[in-house]
Image (cartoon, rainbow, N blue to C red):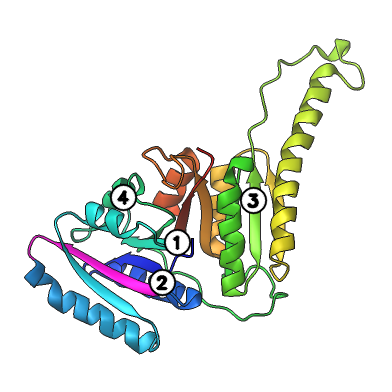
Amino acid sequence: MTLHHVVVGVDGTPAAVRALDLAADDAARRSAELRVVYAVPDRDEAGPILSSAAARIRERHPGLRVVTTAAQGGAVRALAAESEGAALTVVGTRGFGGVTGTLFGSVSLRLAAQVHGPLMIVRGDHVCHGETAGSDAGERLGTGHEVLLGLQDDTDVTAAAFAFEEAERRGVWLRVLHSWDRPHITPEMPSLVPATSPGQRRMAQHDRAEEAVARFSLARLQEQHPTVGVDARTVRSGAAQALLEATREAAVVVIGSHGRAGRLGPHLGTVAHTLLHHAHCPVLLVPSTDR
């Protein structure tokens, strides 16, 4: 199914304006409709905010189709409903220590449990790196324009595909951090350990299997997106911290979420929580389709 619209929530705050700008940029790259949603108790209050948002978008993207909606009731319910069939839903947050307006803060986490499809959360306390870049596939990494992918295992294939598509749309490099936790193996007495012990062989076999997962998934996607330059490396421990540090040089970080098929679900892992609280760029959560 072709998805032809992007959804963004607004409430007039600076965090919402940043989310609006990034959602409009994404909709323009997709040649998709942008739906701007403001959830308020009284629809009459929404007029000035929505008019201002539409004017800002038309100035930045004159040819973009924009639809504004004043939704009565809660922001989570309104955005979750609009996200049905959307290519992407975008919200802004000042950070999880406080809430701005009626939309942000902890609302982002509640929305993650109900939204249909990918969700981009734009943190408001870090300046985003350039959100557009040249089309030169040979552009060097470290410019702040790359797409970053956190890849754990083959259940993240949907997130990986989304990251390749995102890098292709932006015309930038894709940086991949593949991580896993090694199984615990009981240490053997040094005097009894041969040159290659059973434990070491099991460890090596596990390492090869895990690295093969990443190579196989990336190779297939690389064939489908030959113009995307890829820089991949494996992290055997401290995945959350490694990804967090890498967000300093990224335009967006993409990670998978293993909820119900097509939904993010109520439970986000350690890596997701770390990034949502501390990432230096927008965080894009992609639900798996393995259930």
Tell me whether the residue at label 2 lies in contact with that at label 1, contact meaning CB atoms closer than 8 angstroms. yes
* Residue that label 2 marks: 22
Residue type, numbered disc 1? Pro
- Determine the CA span between mark 3 and mark 4: 26 Å
46 is higher (above) or lower (below) than 254: below
Q: Name the residue under label 1.
A: 282
Q: Nearer the viewer, mark 3 or mark 4?
A: 4
Secondary structure category for the residue under label 2:
helix
Q: Where is residue 62 in the image (x, y as percent from the top left)?
A: 38, 89
- Magenta-tinted stretch: 33-42
Quadrant housing residue 283? bottom left
Identity, as a three-letter code, of the amino acid under mark 2: Leu
Sequence-earlier tag: 2 or 4: 2
Between 200 and 190, the one nearer to me in the picture: 200
Q: Residue furthest right?
A: 195
| Mark before the other along the chain sequence, 3 or 1 | 3
Q: Name which residue type carries label 4.
A: Leu
How many labels sit on residues?
A: 4
In front of the other: 195 or 287: 287
Question: As displayed, is residue 127 above or below residue 28?
Answer: above
